[in-house]
Amino acid sequence: FVHTPTLGKLEVFHNCAVGVDSEGTIQFIEDECDDPSEFTLQFTGSKSSTEFEIVDISDSDRKFFFPGFIDTHIHAPQFPNNGIFGDSTLLEWLEIYTFPLESSFQSLRVAQEIYTKCIQRTLSSGTTTASYYATIHTNASKLLADLALKMGQRALIGKVCMNQNSPDNYIETFEECKSSQMEVLKHLENRDPKAEFVAPVLTPRFAGSCTDELLKWLGQLRKSKDYHCQTHLDENHKEIEWITGLFPQYENYTDIYKQTNLLGHKTTLAHCIHLLDEEKDMLVESGSGVSHCPTSNSSITSGEARVRWLLDCGINVSLGTDCSGGFSPNILHVAKHALLVSRHLVMKSKNDHEKLSTSDVLYLATMGGANVLKMDSVGSFAVGKKFDSQLIDMACKDSPIDNFEFQSPKWGELKREESLKKFHDLIDKWVFNGDDRNVSSVFVNGRCVSSRL
Ligand code: GUN
Ligand code: FE
């Protein structure tokens, strides 16, 4: 079992047994345990395998469990456009590629096909929790929630709100937005106890697509029930200039969200690349979190977010694929891009402190996401947490990773520290060379929801 419970720290449990009850909660974690049935006997009072199931991975030193990834910013309807962005930047990209595709979700047949594929693909890439942007359409947003629940992925579902500066065939009036939003909330909230798995997130697309009136209504709604909220912020220079021009009554881009009550401890702000100092202070004061989307930021030429600076200021930071601004639905790829982008910053600033390590980016991919989304029960392995996990096999038949025997950690033979160092090297290999082919199975709440076996 490998995880990153704190920033920069990779923890490895060798020969470890983790016990999960029928509610998906971790009941025990026993390090250096040679016979897991001893512990099941102790905890269940039974050795009968009809009462519990053992997943034994001791046959290979290239297999390990890692916490499921948490993608805090992904546009499910944009899935077919992954990889298609040409040389556009944000505002043209929205008009040329994005709005035409999203408008087609008027059709439930289109939504069913694309949302199913998107959930399958993110699950099989190890994403156990996703914070989704849907479209403005009521029925398609409800369908996304139903599919996530059925397929077993934890999800926040954001019906997108936009009532200005949008194409004629992809826009709603303030009144339409209010009634659609309330209907989606009702659909999501009338499903207790499953609400634990799929919950709503208020989603003004960005200030550019929403009138002041709509932002204020959403801000009031957010405060009324401490709802999750997500939007885009400070992604691109032209976007910032345009949006601050649309809202001259506010001090800066972040102030638009602050004054309309959209900032808060359950608010996720995607990108945050070009934040001013005073905007950063507003995030700190409100406890809002950041979704860092380096794949998207590089693809549509938005810029390099200063992640170390945000972390040093005490802001929670997580990772988002931002499909299809980003081309990959796999958070492992985004983690590696986060690491590379941090090195590009260092090449300019000459300040090594900005460099993110493998452990740092794996933390952002798991615990960082749990912190931003305020989901205390996921992100790492601990007694009382839910078992959301991916089983990684670095030596599976079609593995993209070259494995050499001499690089295996040999527990017992080598000194413990030497074995640990070798294990850290293997994790680096996984991060840089691995992909979804190495994800053998995925568990959400203790239940296997995706498997390549
Ligand atoms: N800003 C407003 N809408 C979008 C979107 O769909 N993707 C990204 N990356 N930025 C946006
Ligand atoms: Fe986005």
Image (cartoon, helix red, strand yellow):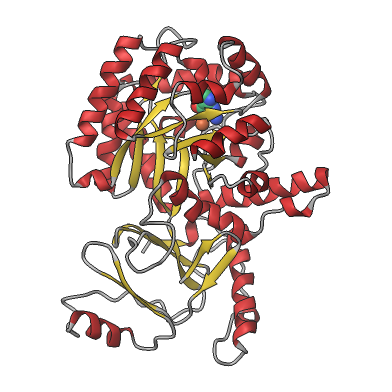
- The location of residue 174, given as percent across then percent down, is 35, 11
Which quadrant holds residue 423? bottom right
Residue at 54 percent across and 52 percent down: it is 364
Q: Nearer the viewer, residue 449 or 247?
A: 247
Seen in the image, is 317 located left or right of residue 229? right
Considering only vertical position in the picture, is 303 above or below 139?
below
Considering only vertical position in the picture, is 152 above or below 393?
above
Residue at 61 percent across and 15 percent down: it is 244
Q: Nearer the viewer, residue 310 or 243?
A: 310
How many dots with numbers? 0
Image quadrant occupied by the N terminus: bottom left
- The location of residue 428, given as percent across then percent down, is 63, 64
Q: Nearer the viewer, residue 325 or 97?
A: 325
Tell me if I can see residue 421 in this picture.
Answer: yes
Which quadrant holds residue 448? bottom left
Seen in the image, is 131 located left or right of residue 420? left
Tell me if I can see residue 121 in this picture.
Answer: no
Residue at 32 percent across and 83 percent down: it is 36
Considering only vertical position in the picture, is 433 above or below 205?
below
Residue at 37 percent across and 40 percent down: it is 117
- The location of residue 453, given as percent across then percent down, is 36, 64
- The location of residue 320, given as percent across then percent down, is 52, 42
Residue, far front: 285
